[in-house]
Image (cartoon, grey):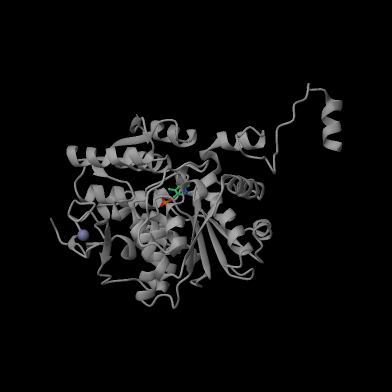
Amino acid sequence: MSHAPFHLACVACAATFPGLELRYRCDCGGVLDVVHAFADAPSLGDLDARLASKAPLDRSGVWRFRELILPVDAQHVATRREGNTGLYDAPSLATYTGLAALRLKHEGENPTGSFKDRGMTTGVTMARALGMTRVACASTGNTSASMAAYAAAAGLEAFVFIPEGKIAYGKLSQALAYGARTVQIEGDFDAAMDLVQQVCAAAGVYLLNSVNPFRIEGQKAIGFEILQDLDWRVPDWIVLPGGNLGNSTALAKGMAELHALGLIDRLPRVAVVQAAGANPLYTAWRSGAETVEPVRAHTVATAIQIGNPVSWQKCLRGLRQTDGVVTEVDDQAILDAKAMVDAAGIGAEPASCATVAGLKRLVGEGVIAPDADVVGILTGHLLKDPDVVVGYHQDGLEGITATYANAPVKVRGALDEVLALLGG
Ligand SMILES: *Cc1c(COP(=O)(O)O)cnc(C)c1O
Ligand SMILES: [Zn+2]
């Protein structure tokens, strides 16, 4: 196998392995980091020049940063021009959260509707670079939707393991539509995760869950793109939801690397928001514990309904590096925040809106100053989970009050009836 300008390093014991070796964990069980040589890191000017280029790699909001993400032979790259998502000024949500101003980066605008595409373009590219023809993942939905699409586009066979009855329909329909072999298992996400790891080891299938360190590399591009959107000004805070904790790991890792390369002169603080019903990181962080203990997860925000997060160790490291914080919000707060995000004309799936609910809490508690420069990440598209939207607005969700309900109005169809509605 040829030499690569990166290698793998164990987060637990610091053992190292070749970059192109097929492995997801250290022999000690620890998760792995991709460590780059960064021999030919681009300048910020180089990166900005690529915004005007029509070359396919430059048009991708991940591969534009390729030397910082995954320097491999371009023939292996599987891209759908992911990234390039909007960074929106959201004045109504600034008011809602108690901030003077707020920007939201909408990762729901990726090709399959979530940030998972940024990690999947690098993951599927590595599958090809390693000569693998079959890929698999366990998923609460978005990972499988994304993997199914990228595998189909790259001509790889895809296997998806999902917890029965716990996946939003928008996501399940994507996995089926893109042709992935979809296996519903009795049990939760954590059980599906255990099974898929065994299957991949036993059957020579490439594992594309976020334990795969190359997915993390692609997801670093969210942070890179936020900085590029801001003309490389570093915000005070970047806020995002946390489930398996791969995305928060990626954000902090990417920022620390830019800083070490001298491309930025300070780090943003990272705030991770968990659902109160799936809060193992929050519990550990609040008590100052060194390890994250698994919990049984239950939340309306299915994309973060994860009790045993695979990247907890890397996430804690990132929080220490960035002077980060962790908070939790309950389902009522998530869905009320979602109603506000949706009503702003932006719209996002429930897990994404934990960002806004968490911001409201952190500003309320004085952790984030009202005049701070804040970017929130919305992770997935509104249409991923239509059942929750319709349920909320018709006040049909158990245990949830539809604070900002916008229920459909029923009429017989007579003009005077409708005119009365419009008038008052
Ligand atoms: C995957 C996902 C998350 C959680 O990201 P992690 O990397 O697992 O912490 C949050 N929101 C959405 C929409 C997701 O798809
Ligand atoms: Zn190790």
Residue 260 relative to residue 2: left or right: right
Q: Quadrant of the N terminus?
A: bottom left
Q: Is residue 107 above or below residue 112?
A: below
Q: Is residue 396 above or below residue 332?
A: above
Residue 317 relative to residue 418: left or right: left
> x, y (%) of residue 267?
45, 72
Q: Quadrant of the C terminus?
A: top right
**Residue at image x 30%, y 46%?**
208
- Image quadrant in which you'd find residue 198: top left
**Residue at image x 87%, y 26%?**
416
Whether residue 401 appears in this view of the structure is yes
**Residue at image x 44%, y 78%?**
265
Please state the quadrant of the image where ligand 2 appears.
Answer: bottom left
Q: Nearer the viewer, residue 229 or 283?
A: 283
> x, y (%) of residue 280?
43, 52
Whether residue 156 appears in this view of the structure is no
> x, y (%) of residue 39?
25, 72
Residue 134 relative to residue 291: left or right: left
Q: Nearer the viewer, residue 51 or 326?
A: 326
Question: As drawn, which residue projects farthest toward the left?
Answer: 1
- Image quadrant in which you'd find residue 382: top right
Q: Nearer the viewer, residue 120 or 269?
A: 269
Q: Is residue 361 above or below residue 367?
A: above
> x, y (%) of residue 341?
62, 50
The mark total stands at 0
